[in-house]
Structures are given as structure tokens and as C-alpha cells.
Amino acid sequence: MRAVVAVIGKDAVGILAKVATKCAEYNANVVEVSQSVLEDIFAMTMLVDISRLNKEFTLLVDDLSAMGRSMGLEIHTMHEDIFKVMHEV
Amino acid sequence: MIKTYDILETIRMIQNECLDIRTITMGISLLDCIDADIDKACEKVYTKITTKAKNLVKVGEDIEKELGIPIINKRLSVTPIAIISAACGCSPVPFAKAMDKAAKDVGVNLIGGYSALVQKGFSAGDIELIGSIPEALACTERVCSSVNIGSTKTGINLDACKLMGQIIKDTAEITKDKACFGAAKLVVFCNAVEDNPFMAGAFHGVGEPDCMINVGVSGPGVVRAALAKYPDADITQISDIIKKTSFKITRVGQLVGTMASKRLGVPFGIVDLSLAPTPAVGDSVAHILEEIGLEQCGTHGTTATLALLNDAVKKGGVMACSSIGGLSGAFIPVSEDAGMIDAARSGVLTIEKLEAMTAVCSVGLDMIVIPGDTTPDTIAAIIADEAAIGMVNCKTTAVRVVPAIGKDVGEELDWGGLFGCGPVMPLKKASASKFINRGGQIPAPLHSLKN
């Protein structure tokens, strides 16, 4: 089971590190990362394995979202299935 | 890995374009609750609903959070109560109260099924139920009612049209201190479907299994945003863009339904491929038609654009899910659609145009506020007209009009929330009373004879 963590906002030092640390806290293994910075706007998508989480997935969703808000970023953590069904036939 | 572009597109659809799952509706059969003692029957109804649906809201909320997509409503539909209450031989209002309490206790905002199916005539239970609708809707918060008065196979029960004209008026009267809200929870159908997840017309048909999950999708804002990217596309391309968008929306509905069904241990029924608007900005079906090229919804060209939209939504959605059902098409509830409200206020959208629109899209004259002094016979004639469109075109049509008691054209009713607000729309003044009072059955059309 995997989830996508999408981070959008103004670029700053340490975004990737903070998100990865939070994932580690929940025992979510980062599988893949893709990021780009376009004119100051930072967009990162991260694929994480959530099959061995030590807490509920929904708590991770809330936690990352709250962390995002405190850093002035939008962080959406969503099960990968929603992207697969929408974009793969 | 999933492409970043696709991830951002999905997030944009949800965050900016109001993509959501409109409803997860659990259908529950109450056939095993029938009892000649009404108190016992109501207790069984309450127990069955609260047992089957106890985890519905929690499961809905969990899925919502995991997938990151809002699931706006979690709702219930039950077997038409006229069938259940017939054995009691008295007013079925206690059933409405039991449904209301059960809905409240499991945390759903609406429960449908205070219904009767009288397309070919009334049984004693049907008469009791229909007569009790005004009281039932006035003394409950969450109960929705529907009556099927016609079908392509049976024709139209004109006596039922007449009766429902009176019942709608009475329901508005009895709830006039709540902006006549009772009438907003009452639908009159022709060709009602048994697996409709949308309120106020949902009920759980007798041919359905004991318990079932049906999902209604939405997403007018997403379709509009997709079209806005192609201002110069020809109409065939427009249809194609709608199909692709509808496919994506419906796939999410299928995913949510599958997850909910698994977690609740209840079979997954259907996805209702609908574009259901809300009064929120950016969630309007009227605005899609305007994006296609109308200055305002309701003007000439509205029927054609709506027909195209409705057809493309189905074509896109059909491949995206395992089983389609319900009403499936674009909804045009006036008070629940910001673009329709504006068009009705400006006078461009009239009831005559809405009637034409209902011939090519899902359902019918929906959430239309009419003058408070409209006679029951005129409401009955509106129902008969709409039912005729459904009967002849082999489609579902419905009437959900709200007589604004004490108000006239130029004034409005406002319910807030998903029900929105609507201006009082003018009707013809000439009477149809003689026609309505003839009574009897309008025979089924020739093309009902398909065997």
C-alpha cells in the first residue's frame, strides 16, 4: 500500500528533510521523490510505502497537513489509488 | 511512478474545482420489519437501520481522509414505507419518526423512502401514506418522501397527480414557518428508479438485496474548468473533453464505492453518473452550458447543449464503473445551482424552458419555487406534464416544486446549505382543473408494448 505526498508552496530550506522526517516518525518508507522549483514555487511529489505504519494513516494525513500549514505550504497526503484510477485505464 | 502532472491535476480538481463524491447511500430493505403492531414494526425499523448503518458515517469519513476527496453526504434509503406500513392499517407517521431518529443516531443528514408506488392505482396502505406526508415531513427533520405516479409500462395515474398536487400544497402550508421546506423533501416521480442514491427521491426498491451501497458522483466545476481550457474547440471536441472528464470523476466514484462496500461488508450496487450541482461558486451545471457558449442558461440553445452534456457524461462514465444505475445524468435543480438561480432571477430561465430541458437530461422540474397561491390542480397539471415527458421518452422524470406560501413572483425562498435559494418563478394563470378532475389513468404509450 502506497500513498502520495504532494507538497506545493514557496521554496524554502529543508522542506524535503522535514517531510521525510515526519514520514519516518510514522514508519512510512519513502520510495520515490520528484521535485521541481519553478520561479520560487516548490512542487514535490513523494511516493511512500504505508504498509508498515506504526499509527493510523489518517493521523499521518492530518499531521503532514498541519506541518504544511505551519510552514506556509500545502501538503496533501492521499492514497495512491485515487491517482491510479483517475489517470490509468 | 504516477506522473506529477496527474497528481497536481487531481489535487487541483479537488481543491479548486469542487470535485467531490456527492453521496454514499446505503439502501436497506425493511421487508423483514413488517408487523401488524405499528409499535413493534417501528422498533424493528429503528433497530435494523441503526444496526446496518452504524459504521456508515465513520467508514465514509475514513475513506474521505485516506483518498483526500470530500464525500459530502452519507445517506440512507429504505423500502417504500407504504409497503411496510400496509399491515398496520393506521397512519404511518410513527415510521417517519422512527426513520428520523435512526438517521439522527447514525449521523446521516437525510433518509429517503417515505414513499409509495401508485403508478397503476392505490392500495389502502398507499392512501394512508400519501395522506400522512405533510405531517410526516413537518414533524421530522431528515426524512424524505417520494411518490411514483406513472411509468412507461403503466401510464399515468391521474388521480395520483391530483392527490399529489394537494399534498405538495399542504406540505408547503404546514411548513411555511420553515420557508415551506417540507415540499423540498418531497418528489413526485414517473419511472422512479429503485437504486437512486440521490435525495430527496431515494428509496430502496423491493427488487434490491437486503442491504446495498450506491454512490453518487459529482463534479460540474471540473467539467467547466476542463472546457475552459479549450475556448476554440468545436462541439465534437467539447463532447470528447466532457467524456474524458466524466471518466475520471466516475472512476473515483467506483473506487469509493468499492472501498465502502468492502469495509461495511455490504454489496456494492451502482454508481450514479451524475453532475449534481451545489449552490457553491464553481459547482454549477448552468455554468457548463454557459462555458459551451450560451450567454445565460435558459436562452435558446440550452436544450441542445444540455443534451450533449448529459450524453457525454454517460458515455465517459459508462466505461469507468462496473455497474451504472440511479438517475445518471446532469441534474438541474434550480435552487441548488448558482447559475440557474441567476438565470431564473433574470427571467432568462423559465419553467417552460426547464420543462424542455427535462426531456434531455436526468430527472425533471427540480427545486423550483412557485407562487404561494398556485392551486393544487395547477401543481397536479405540472406533475402530469412532466410525467408525460418521462412516460413517452422512457426516462425518469420528477417534480419537486415548492409553493412559497404568502409569496409571489419577485420574492425568494432561502433554505441555505445544499438546498440553496430560489426566486418564485411565474406560472401560467389559465386553469387545467377540468382535465385534472376527470381522474382515471392515462394509458401507457404504444411503445411500452415491447414484448
Image: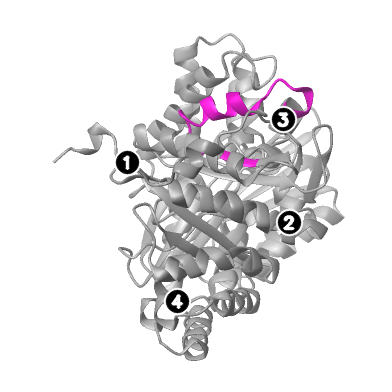
Left or right of B122 on screen, residue B98:
right
Q: In x, y percent, where is residue A43?
A: 70, 39
Give a yes or no on whether discs 2 and 3 share a subunit: yes
Q: Amino acid at mark 1?
A: Thr
**Is B31 contained in the magenta span?**
no
Return the disc, 2 or 3, that comes first in the chain's sequence. 2
CB of mark 2 within 8 Å of CB of mark 3? Answer: no
Circle 2 is placed at which residue position? B173
Q: Residue at x 31, y 40 (%)?
A: B443
- Mark 1 and mark 2: Cα distance apart in space: 32 Å
- Above or below for B191 versus B432: below
Circle 4 is placed at which residue position? B85
**In which image quadrant can residue A9 be found?**
top right
Q: Which chain is home to disc 3?
A: B
Q: Amino acid at mark 3?
A: Pro
Circle 1 is placed at which residue position? B152
Question: Which residue is more in the foreground, B112 or B182?
Answer: B182
Tag of residue B426: 3
- Mark 3 and mark 4: Cα distance apart in space: 38 Å
Q: Which chain is home to disc 4?
A: B
Secondary element at tag 4: helix
Q: Residue at x 28, y 34 (%)?
A: B445
Q: Residues within 10 Å of mark 2 (few under 14, many from 20)?
A: many
Which one is closest to the eye, mark 4 or mark 2?
2
Q: In x, y percent, where is residue B329?
A: 47, 37
Q: In x, y percent, where is residue B285?
A: 61, 32
What residue span does the magenta drawing correspond to?
Answer: B344-367
Return the disc, 4 or 2, that comes first in the chain's sequence. 4
- Mark 2 and mark 3: Cα distance apart in space: 19 Å
Secondary element at tag 1: loop
